[in-house]
Image (spheres, rainbow, N blue to C red):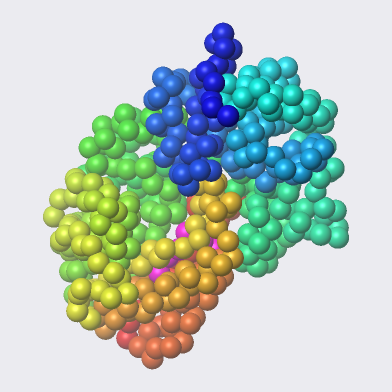
Amino acid sequence: MAERRPRGGRIDPARLAALDVLKAVRVDDAYANLALPHALAEHGLTGRDAAFATELVSGTIRRQGTYDAIIDACLTKPRLEAKVRDVLRLGVHQLLSMRVPDHAAISSSVELARARVGVGPVGLVNAVLRKVAAHDLDGWIRRVAPDPGTDPFGYASIAHSHPRWVVEELADALASAVQLEDLLAADNAPPRVMLVARPGLSTVAELVAAGGTASTLSPYAVELAGGDPAAIPAVAEGRAGVQDEGSQLVALALAEAEIDGRDERWLDVCAGPGGKSALLAALAAERGARLVANERQHHRSKLVARSLRAARGGLLGVVTGDGTRPPWRDGTFDRVLVDAPCSGLGALRRRPESRWRRTEKDLEALVPLQRALLDRALDAVRPGGVVVYATCSPVLAETSGVVDAVVGSRDDTRVGTTRQLWPHRDGTDAMFIATLHRG
């Protein structure tokens, strides 16, 4: 049925924008954090209205698994049109996780369905949401989740809105039931906005003066409590950037590792979209070294070049190339970073839709690629140099499994240090960092 315009102005633009983003995520495989700014601009939202729409989108997507179980428990027929489910998810989030009065959450959802889907599902939306309003979130979890004593992973999957296979992989990586609960809860909390002051271009003091607070894990990190990062001059000019502290620590691990001999040529094998490369180029410039930033896809190479637009002296060039079949000669570089393509399960706070898109089969394709990239990176570094292997995933198959397999197949490499960061413990994305030395 064709979409209808809202009647009498009863639907506020924030809810319309949120529904537009959910549709883009579902239909176009968009990322919410990229689709949201466009939707906010299209509906003219700023300030509190923009914040309301942002919470509607991010909270609904994070809690999608929980909300779907609740919605299904309230249905008399199992089948539900996808765009109706989008409306219901937004309504459930308002009822169970936001300070929206029940009558406002229900009536606005009914009108949203009427305007964007048609009159057909209006009664269903009203009936389901009235059932949902009968209990709070904890009460619903007790009703729809498996018994935690007999099926702890099933319970955690529903209670914390993660696919079961993701819960199991995270449990294997943590080996602690208590920490698992903390991690899953942390995945559902909005991440802090972290800035990076690129050395030689900006300073922590400059970003603090712009409204930030210096952090502790990275010497270049500043937390921004509120406001638009792009409004800060250093960020707008590319002298600073928005970058999770875990990603900053990846770049620092490469820059601070001890090597033997010359220290002139650095390589970022998988550079897109360019945040780590920008920090590495700044660090390299301070030492008289220069960075090659490589990216396989040309359109992502353009993003890398944009991120490096303020680089001074530390950049040798941006290259479009396949890291498994590289255009450079073996032994060319002194330091090499492999920030490998991965499942992204370490950044579920930041990209909550990833948990619903990734499957166990993805690992079957990713792990061989990760091994090939690391193996060729070890060829690219000279004897005495260093390679840092990193993933934004704590999954063992993608982390220690890759390192052990590659190092075990070579007689010229030793593992230096490894580090696994965690959202619930370190406040960062769950970055894995391994330092490997070429003999």
When the figure is inspected, residue 21 is found, relative to residue 290, above or below; the finding is above
Asked if one can make out residue 309 in the rendered structure from this viewpoint, the answer is yes
Q: Quadrant of the C terminus?
A: bottom left
In the foreground, 376 or 192: 376
Q: Residue at x 44, y 21 (%)?
A: 43
When the figure is inspected, residue 279 is found, relative to residue 79, above or below; the finding is below
Q: Residue at x 32, y 78 (%)?
A: 376
Q: Residue furthest top?
A: 8
Q: Is residue 426 magenta?
A: no
Percent from the top left, x then y, of residue 202?
A: 25, 42
Q: Residue furthest bottom?
A: 411
When the figure is inspected, residue 82 is found, relative to residue 280, above or below; the finding is above
Percent from the top left, x then y, of residue 343?
A: 50, 61
Q: Residue at x 49, y 57 (%)?
A: 344
Q: Is residue 118 left or right of residue 418?
A: right
Q: Quadrant of the N terminus?
A: top right
Name which quarter of the figure residue 178 lies in.
bottom right
Percent from the top left, x then y, of residue 164?
A: 69, 58
In the foreground, 76 or 36: 76
Q: Residue furthest front?
A: 1
Span shown in magenta: 389-394
Percent from the top left, x then y, of residue 97?
A: 68, 31
Q: Is residue 165 left or right of residue 429?
A: right
